[in-house]
Image: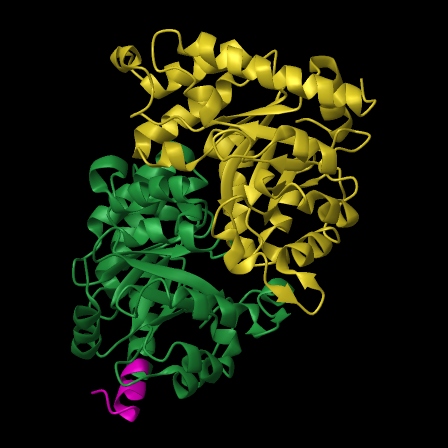
Chain colours: A green, B yellow
Amino acid sequence: MMSRQELIEQIKKKKSFLCVGLDPDINKIPEFLKSYPDPILEFNKRIIDATQDLCIAYKPNAAFYEAYGIKGLQSLIDTYKYLPKDCLSIIDAKRGDIGNTSDKYAKAFFDEQSGGMSFDAITITPYMGNDSVTPYLAYEGKWVIILALTSSVGSKDFQYLQTGDGYLYENVIKKANTWAGADRIMYVVGATKSTEFTNIRAYAPDNFLLVPGVGAQGGSLEEVCKYGITKDCGLIVNSSRSILYASNGEDFADAARAEALSLQQQMQAELEKAGIL
Amino acid sequence: MMSRQELIEQIKKKKSFLCVGLDPDINKIPEFLKSYPDPILEFNKRIIDATQDLCIAYKPNAAFYEAYGIKGLQSLIDTYKYLPKDCLSIIDAKRGDIGNTSDKYAKAFFDEQSGGMSFDAITITPYMGNDSVTPYLAYEGKWVIILALTSSVGSKDFQYLQTGDGYLYENVIKKANTWAGADRIMYVVGATKSTEFTNIRAYAPDNFLLVPGVGAQGGSLEEVCKYGITKDCGLIVNSSRSILYASNGEDFADAARAEALSLQQQMQAELEKAGIL
């Protein structure tokens, strides 16, 4: 559990708003790890050990574990258990279903007694509206991170549809703001659309934004901060591939740390520029 | 694997377009099953045994298994293995993510070597657009079932947003039709909106529609058929709770069969009315 205030404190303490995305791909991890009983867990543990003082969040992507069935889910559960408590734990699951089904997904990811995990936050797709989101909010202190504007090519298909009252993604933010406040809801906003941050801040002045797409997906940290940073920072910037696969040799953890350190230093400069540090 | 032609043949042979939703809730299944090593699997097996000649599809809802962690996933995998081959197997997972992540979800549910399951079809949420759907279509012969208009209260929040060119859900259908044909794509259309079927058929004249919401959610089969049936039937109507929990005693399988039989008979009458039988 991590409150908004605790999250802001961690950002100031670590001089970072980095989230490390844990999307381990068995075909990309170093060969020598494959002799371990659970190579993916071993990979994640070493990435976590190498980066935890430089980041304020970890975000395992559920798909990368589910792809391997029972074994993959066990890797996810064991990775969850290994996450440091001073980092926000986000399960990137992008679930979205009607109320009675969302209840069950919430149990899977928020109720450790039942599903084996209790993440601090979950990513949610908004297409099914209110009742697809509220069951997660019933878990006191947990965060819901709603897809608004994503960094993929497909974002153009629907998110940018013009409605009578702005783009679809703007409608998502305006509507979701009526479900809970900035202490419970964050939005996913792709870094490849940095000029859109001005627009998003008009609707979501205080919400934290989870920003994928810096690094491998081509977004610029400086641009994101220019348009998206608030007095409380208000940003969690994710990097997955550029950290995880900085090297595929025995030095992968050191290389991952170097990449995370470089991002943390850029973030520190941005936090100073914004007068937060 | 089940092609469109095979699906139509099954519908004619069984005189039914019933899908049984396998959403087993441990708090609702008969008490005596709880002495079995896997009560949920045992429940599903008996439901399947009691209904398989009356339905043409089964649809496990992933959330109801994921809620129980490793044990739940094992129940899902074992349920998948028990599904009869003459029924379309649909995993109701409502996934939706960028391309490289959708690849992994596709592996989880379509690649038995990797995830332990190989369903014929998966439900997908369209918010992230094209690249969130195409990785599933790369699996030859598999179906993608895209959320268009759902039966929940939250459907009003976004699906009915008016764009410059019709409602959002109409845009979803029009756009998705450019990704693949009616032999690969179905749409989810909630039964509580039966008058909308006329409208949907204008955009999706040939696609099969997966229709939840008959029974516990209040939709009427007659209304759905009146507006939605095509010369190939074009409908798969799902019922979950009204069949699964027709009784919570030792006679639950008989009660489930009686409920499924009643639906099959209504469906037969509708197929005859439409000149399909």
Look at 75% across and 24% down and name the residue there: B8
Look at 75% across and 29% down and name the residue there: B233
Q: How many marks?
A: 0
Whether residue B271 is situated above or below residue A117 in the rendered picture: above
* Residue A91, x across and y down, in percent: 34, 53
* Residue A101, x across and y down, in percent: 40, 40
Whether residue A183 is situated above or below residue A33 in the rendered picture: below
Q: In front here: B41 or B113?
A: B41
**Magenta stretch, main secondary structure class:** helix
Look at 64% across and 57% down and name the residue there: B130
* Residue B215, x across and y down, in percent: 52, 29
The answer to which quarter of the image holds residue B207 is top right
Magenta-colored span: A267-277
Whether residue A76 is situated above or below residue B260 in the rendered picture: below
Q: In front here: A83 or A143?
A: A143
Magenta span has A159? no
Q: In front here: A214 or A255?
A: A214
* Residue A209, x across and y down, in percent: 37, 72
**Is residue B157 in view?**
yes
The answer to which quarter of the image holds residue B118 is top right
Q: In front here: B18 or A210?
A: B18
Tell me: A46 left or right of B177. Answer: left
**Is residue B85 in view?**
no
The answer to which quarter of the image holds residue A201 is bottom left
Look at 31% across and 81% down and name the residue there: A267
